Structure formats: structure tokens, C-alpha cells
Image: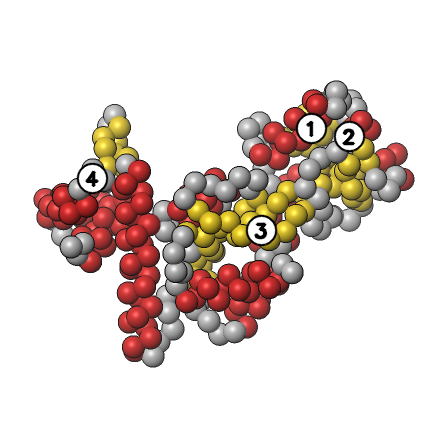
Amino acid sequence: MLRSEWLSSFARFAEDLNFTRAAKRLHISQPALHVQIRRLAEAVGVPLYVRAGRSLALTREGEALLAHAREAAARDSDVRARLSGERSGPVVLSAGEGAYRYLLGPALRAYLRGGHAPLSLLTRDREGTAHAVASGEADLGVASFDRVPEGLVATPLAAVGPMLVMPRAHRLSKKRVVHLAELADLALIVPPAGRPHRTALAAALAAAGVPWRVAVEASGWDLMLHFAAMGLGLTVVNDFCQLPRGLVGRPLEGLLPVRYVLLSRAGAPRPAATLLRQAITLAMR
């Protein structure tokens, strides 16, 4: 039997992977915490963490149990709130800053107008969002994925096309649609190397045999657009972005759309998470 206090202690320990800090937060002794985690590991029959050099890391089974522990804590909180007539604890959504600013606004407004459980919003990149959902830190996540992360369920939400952004006076602003070949030898404002948008753009340009160069590396649509408005270079962003004054955007032919999905864990979600899911999917229709 998995005792609730063991699960609660394990969830707290997993936040820092440090017995000393976790014991202080739980107001118990460090040996007592060790005993609880050991008994929990014995109950499930697998190691929950391993030592990696001077630090600790959760095993794959530990990650799965952490998600279960967080779900159990959230459901217990929901039941207590329902019995006492209080509002449930917050439903947690993870997404990137761009998705919050340009994609999810109507859905969040619709959810909150219903008087449901409060929202707690995590701002993470797509890898961070997938991890937050998988670990139970977030109930739901919104991010762009072509392949569903292992262990998660993905519901398609929206396909967002690419847009080339430039000063109004730029020669390409006179075109209705810009093709990749027309970016030859241009200086582009792009995310740092290794980021998904940079990787996709660089691969498309390379496949088309288009030479280009980096003007500025910047993280986030808003900062990329800010630098474009300063005249530091052209940039390619999702076409849902709002452009600063003096800039124009044109569809970019030859780069695939970004596909946003709603991520969740398998199984029955919390009632508040179900309501948020409904608000998001309805707003995307």
C-alpha cells in the first residue's frame, strides 16, 4: 500500500533532490524522510532515485511515481475543497510565452469567466512543457510538436504558418508571398543554435540551397521583433504574432507550419483540468 504521507514526502524530495532541504520543508528529521522514501521504494519494488556524481537523479520509475504523487495530492485537495464548499486548488497549464500571448488568450478568458478553479501558468519551452506535464507539475501543456512525446497524449490545436517580418520600406514588402530563395544573402534575426525554430529554418534554407547569415541571435518572438524594428535584420516568426509599428509581415513559402498540440497524461484528468481542456479546444475551433 502506498501511504499518502510517503507520496507527499517523495513529491517534496523530488523538487530539490536533496534530503536536507526536503526534510526542513516537511518539518521532519532527515532520517525520518530517508525511511519514508525507502519504504515507498520497497512498496513499489523499484529504485526511485540514483546517485549521479555528487547529486541525485530520479529514475524513470521515480519520474512516473512523482506524476502519480502530484496527481494524488491534487485530487485530495479537490475532494477537501468540494466537501468544505471551497474552490479547488489551481489547475496548472504550461506553455511558451508566445502561445500565451498570441494563441491562448481567448481560451484563458473563457475558462476564468466560468468561475472555475484558479489558473496557475508555467512559462516553459516545449521540452520544459512536456516534462512539466509528464512529471505531474502541470495538468496540461500547449506546445508545438510533430511527434508526441513518449507517455503523453497530444490533441491537435492549431497549425500556424511562418511569416517573414521586415521594415515597411524593404523591397520584399511589396510581395504578397515571399519564397525561401528570396532570402538569399539576407541577415536574419534567429533564435540561438539548437532551438527548434532555428533548426527548422536553417534546414529549410539549406535544402533550398539558400545562403544566409545571422544578424542577431535572440530568444522569444517579442525580442526578435524588437530587434527587427530596430533595423538589425529581418526575422521569421509565427504568423499569429502582433507586429510593432513600422514592420510588415508576409507569408513565407517553403517553411512548414508549426503545429500546436494540447498535452496531457493518460487517464482521467481532474475536473478543473477537463474544463480548461474544453475551453482551449473550443477556442481553437
Residue picked out by circle 4: 46
Q: Secondary structure at mark 4?
A: loop
Residue picked out by circle 1: 204
Labelled disc at residue 180: 2
Give the mark, 2 or 1, whose residue is nearer the N terminus: 2
Q: In whole angstroms, how far apart are the C-alphas of marks 3 and 1?
A: 23 Å
Give the mark, 3 or 2, whose residue is nearer the N terminus: 3
Residue 138 visible in the picture: no
Going by the numbered disc 4, the residue's amino acid type is Val
Going by the numbered disc 2, the residue's amino acid type is Leu
Labelled disc at residue 156: 3
Going by the numbered disc 3, the residue's amino acid type is Pro
- Quick check: marks 2 and 1 in contact, CB under 8 Å? yes
Q: Residue at x 28, y 53 (%)?
A: 69
User: Given the current orientation, which residue lies at the most extreme bottom position?
Assistant: 85
The crowding category of the residue bearing disc 1, from other C-alpha atoms within 10 Å (few below 14, some 14 to 19, many at least 20), is some
Between label 3 and label 2, give the one nearer the viewer. Answer: 3
